[in-house]
C-alpha cells in the first residue's frame, strides 16, 4: 500500500507541475517524457528504492499492457486531431512511408545491430522490427503545443501524425515474422504469417475498428439529435471508445492497436473530432495525464545492468540508429512525399521519427514470445537515446526552421 501511495503522489505531482509549466517547458529542451523517465529512474530499484516493480507481479505483462493502453489512447487522440480525410487525400505519401519507408528502416536498424553488436541475423531483425515504427506518443509531443503550431508547417505535422498512427499497428506483421521464424515450424511460417497475421489480425482489426468507430459516431449523432446528452465530455466519450475497441479487438484476437486508429478515423468522419477535440483540449489532456505514467514505469524497470554490459557498442548502435535509420530513407523518398519535398522540412521529417512507447511494447512482446531479451535490452536503450535526443532538439529545431523559413519568405 505504501508503494501505491508513492506512485500516486509521484505521477500526480509530475502531471501537476508539468501542467502548471506547460508553456515554458514546451519551449525548452526538457520534454515531459524525459522528465517522467528520470522520475521513475530516481524512485526505482537503482535510485532511491522507493518503488520496486518486481514485487508487483510480472513486469513484462505489466509493461506490455500499460504500453498497449497508452498507445491506444494516443492513437485515438491522433486520429481525432487530423483534418477530415487527410489520410485519404495524402494516401500516396502514406503508402510510400508505410510500404517502403518502414521496411527500409527495419532493415537498416537490423544491419546496424548485426554490425555493432554481432547479433545473429534473426535476433538483429527482431531488434530492427521493434524500433522501425515512428512512435505516436513522442511524435505527438513534438507536433503539438503552441511552439510547433507556430513554427512547423501544418502539412508536415499532419503527415508525421498520420504515419505514426498507422505504422505503429502495421509494424506488428514485421515484428511477428522473425518471431515466427524463430519459434514456429519452418513449413508453416509463411502461411501462418499471411493468413493469421495479415488477414485476420491486421485486416479484421481494421474492419472491427471501422465498424465500432462508425457505430459510435452514429450513436453520438443520435444522442445529440434527441438531446440525451447532459454536459457531454468529448474526452470521456473518446476514452470510452478507445477502451471498447482495445477490449473487443483483443478478445477477438486481432490487432487492437491498429483497430483503435481505424476506429478514431471512422468516428472522426461523422462527428468532426478535430473541432471538438480542440475545443475540449483533448490532445493536451491526453499528453499530460494519460501518456506520462508509462515513461515513469519505464524508468522504474529500465535494465541498467544490461545496458552497462553492452558497453560503448550499445551507445554507438543507438546513435547510429538515430542518424541512419530514418534520415536517409526520408531523403531518398522525398520526391514521392508531397508535404515534405522542400529540403528543410524533409530534414525535419527525417530527424523527427522518434522511437518510444511502441518500441517498448514490441520489445517486451518479443521477449515474452521468444524468451530472448536481446530486443528488450537493445530496444529499450535506443528508446532512452531517442527520448533524450528528440526531446532536447524538438524546440530548438522548430525555432530554427521557423526562423530560416521566415528569412526565405522575406527575401
Image (cartoon, rainbow, N blue to C red):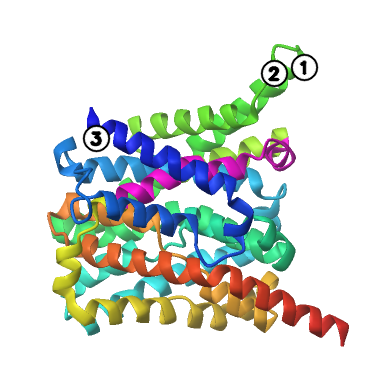
Residue under numbered circle 1:
225
Q: CA distance from mark 2 to mark 1?
A: 14 Å
- Residue at x 60%, y 26% (from the top left corner): 216
Which of label 2 and label 1 is nearer to you?
2
Q: Is residue 278 magenta?
A: yes
At which x and y percent is residue 8?
A: 36, 34
Q: Is 128 displayed left or right of 98 in the figure?
A: left
- Residue at x 42%, y 74% (from the top left corner): 104
Which of label 2 and label 3 is nearer to you?
3
Upstream in the sequence, badge 2 or badge 3?
A: 3
Q: Report the disc number at residue 3.
A: 3
Which of label 3 and label 1 is nearer to you?
3
Report the predominant secondary structure element of the magenta stretch: helix
Q: CA distance from mark 3 to mark 1?
A: 47 Å
Circle 2 residues within 10 Å: few <14, some 14–19, many ≥20: few
Residue under numbered circle 2:
231
Circle 1 residues within 10 Å: few <14, some 14–19, many ≥20: few
Q: Mark 3 touching mark 1, by CB under 8 A? A: no
Quadrant showing the C terminus: bottom right
Q: Is 373 displayed left or right of 110 in the figure?
A: left
Range of magenta residues: 272-298
Amino acid at each position: 500500500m505504501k508503494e501505491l501511495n508513492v506512485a500516486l503522489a509521484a505521477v500526480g505531482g509530475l502531471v501537476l507541475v508539468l501542467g502548471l509549466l506547460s508553456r515554458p517547458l514546451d519551449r525548452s529542451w526538457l520534454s515531459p517524457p524525459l522528465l517522467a523517465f528520470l522520475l521513475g529512474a530516481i524512485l526505482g530499484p537503482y535510485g532511491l528504492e522507493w518503488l520496486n516493480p518486481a514485487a508487483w507481479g510480472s513486469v513484462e505483462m505489466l509493461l506490455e499492457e500499460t504500453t498497449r493502453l497508452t498507445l491506444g489512447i494516443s492513437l485515438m487522440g491522433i486520429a481525432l486531431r487530423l483534418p477530415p480525410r487527410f489520410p485519404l487525400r495524402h494516401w500516396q505519401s502514406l503508402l510510400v512511408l508505410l510500404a517502403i519507408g518502414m521496411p527500409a528502416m527495419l532493415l537498416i536498424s537490423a544491419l546496424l545491430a548485426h554490425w555493432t553488436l554481432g547479433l545473429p541475423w534473426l535476433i538483429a531483425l527482431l531488434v530492427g522490427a521493434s524500433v522501425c515504427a515512428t512512435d505516436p506518443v513522442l511524435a505527438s509531443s513534438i507536433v503539438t503545443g503552441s511552439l510547433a503550431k507556430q513554427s512547423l508547417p501544418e502539412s508536415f505535422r499532419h503527415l508525421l501524425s498520420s504515419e505514426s498512427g498507422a505504422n505503429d499497428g502495421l509494424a506488428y506483421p514485421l515484428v511477428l515474422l522473425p518471431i515466427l521464424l524463430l519459434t514456429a515450424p519452418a513449413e508453416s511460417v509463411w502461411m501462418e504469417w499471411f493468413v493469421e497475421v495479415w488477414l485476420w489480425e491486421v485486416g479484421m482489426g481494421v474492419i472491427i475498428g471501422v465498424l465500432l468507430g462508425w457505430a459510435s459516431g452514429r450513436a453520438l449523432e443520435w444522442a445529440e439529435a434527441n438531446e440525451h446528452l447532459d454536459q457531454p465530455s468529448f474526452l470521456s466519450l473518446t476514452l470510452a471508445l478507445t477502451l471498447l475497441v482495445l477490449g473487443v479487438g483483443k478478445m477477438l484476437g486481432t490487432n487492437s492497436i491498429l483497430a483503435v486508429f481505424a476506429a478514431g478515423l471512422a468516428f472522426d468522419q461523422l462527428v468532426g473530432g478535430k473541432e471538438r477535440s480542440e475545443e475540449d483540449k483533448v490532445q493536451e489532456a491526453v499528453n499530460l495525464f494519460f501518456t506520462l505514467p508509462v515513461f515513469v514505469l519505464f524508468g522504474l524497470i529500465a535494465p541498467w545492468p544490461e545496458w552497462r554490459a553492452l558497453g560503448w557498442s550499445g551507445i554507438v548502435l543507438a546513435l547510429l540508429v538515430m542518424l541512419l535509420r530514418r534520415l536517409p530513407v526520408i531523403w531518398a523518398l522525398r520526391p514521392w512525399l508531397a508535404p515534405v519535398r522542400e529540403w528543410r522540412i524533409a530534414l525535419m521529417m527525417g530527424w523527427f521519427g522518434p522511437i518510444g512507447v511502441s518500441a517498448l511494447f514490441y520489445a517486451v512482446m518479443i521477449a515474452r514470445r521468444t524468451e530472448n531479451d536481446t530486443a528488450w535490452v537493445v530496444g529499450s536503450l535506443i528508446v532512452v537515446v531517442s527520448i533524450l535526443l528528440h526531446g532536447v532538439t524538438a524546440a530548438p529545431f522548430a525555432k530554427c526552421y521557423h526562423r530560416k523559413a521566415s528569412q526565405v519568405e522575406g527575401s
